[in-house]
């Protein structure tokens, strides 16, 4: 399946992109993040990143479907 993946903050910096189309065989946002982490060398472990699918936060084991928009959001620091 192909999904649209959007990155923010450190993930955007490490990937060098804000948005990309990804062809994958994985079924969940958690597995997708781990696949992309291995491929692109993201430094944040999966348990530190939140995922939203089609504008709603989801669990790491939520199902993905063809054409979904997946956003990976790292922790944010405030002051």
Image (cartoon, rainbow, N blue to C red):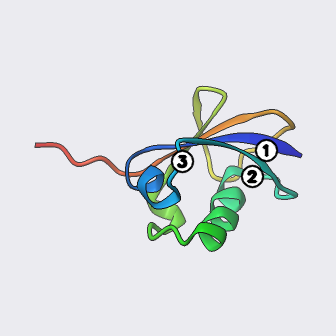
Image position, residue 10 (x, y; %) = 39, 55
User: SS of the residue at dot 3?
Assistant: loop
Badge 3, how many Cα within 10 Å: few under 14, some, many 20+? Answer: few
Image position, residue 21 (x, y; %) = 74, 43
Q: Residue at x 17, y 43 (%)?
A: 78
Q: Are marks 1 and 2 in contact (CB under 8 Å)?
A: yes
Badge 1, how many Cα within 10 Å: few under 14, some, many 20+? Answer: few
Task: Say whether residue 20 is left or right of residue 28.
Answer: left
Q: Earlier in the sequence, mark 3 or mark 1?
A: 3
Distance (Cα) linking label 3 and label 2? 21 Å
Distance (Cα) linking label 1 and label 2? 5 Å
Badge 2, how many Cα within 10 Å: few under 14, some, many 20+? Answer: some
Which quarter of the rendered picture does the C terminus lie within? top left
Q: Nearer the viewer, residue 66 or 64?
A: 66
Q: Nearer the viewer, residue 52 or 61?
A: 52
Q: Which residue is mark 2?
A: 28
Image position, residue 15 (x, y; %) = 52, 57
Q: Which mark is residue 63?
A: 1
Q: Which residue is mark 3?
A: 17
Label 3 vs label 2, nearer the camera: 3
């Amino acid at each position: 399946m192909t999904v649209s993946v959007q990155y923010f903050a450190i993930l955007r910096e490490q990937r060098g992109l804000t948005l990309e189309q990804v062809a994958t065989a994985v079924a969940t946002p958690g597995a997708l993040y781990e696949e992309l982490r291995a491929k692109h060398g993201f430094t944040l472990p999966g348990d530190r990143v939140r995922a939203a699918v089609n504008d709603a936060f989801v669990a790491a084991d939520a199902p993905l479907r063809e054409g979904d928009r997946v956003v990976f959001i790292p922790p944010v620091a405030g002051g």
